[in-house]
Image (spheres, rainbow, N blue to C red):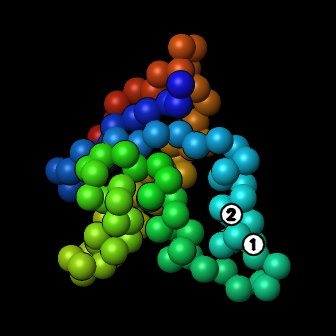
Amino acid sequence: MARQKTITIEGVDYQLQSASFSWYTNLTDLYIRPASGRKNTAKYADALIRGCVIAPAEVAKRGLKFFDDQDDIATPSELVREIENFLSERAEPGGSAEKSTA
């Protein structure tokens, strides 16, 4: 079972679900270290949000578009940092993760 964690950003709870190492490394190879040498941070952030956020459902479904429609730059930036931190955490015995607030 995938690890899950709930974080809070600006009063909104986001439920995160872990991804496999191969999924994450493929994602970084595609958008952060592509063969073309051109980093595409927006596509990386969008894929990371869509791949790891499971709630709120609208954020999970729409990714960056959800925040673009609100002219919100700060929240997705913080959300991406939180997702990256979560993915790099070691799983606790039993696969649980603590709830945190930001």
Give how far across and how far down residue 71 sits, in percent: 24, 81
Circle 2 is placed at which residue position?
Answer: 28
Indicate left or right for 8 with 25 as reference. Answer: left
In this view, 93 is above or below 67: above
Give how far across and how far down residue 54 sits, in percent: 37, 45
Quick check: can you spot residue 17? yes
In this view, 49 is above or below 41: above
Query: Given the image, on which type of amino acid does mark 2 rest?
Result: Thr
In this view, 43 is above or below 37: above
| Residue 33 image label | 1
Q: Residue furthest top?
A: 94
In this view, 13 is above or below 71: above
Q: Which of disc 2 and disc 1 is earlier in sequence?
A: 2
Contact check, label 1 and label 2, Cβ < 8 Å: yes
Indicate left or right for 97 with 70 as reference. Answer: right
Quick check: can you spot residue 76? no
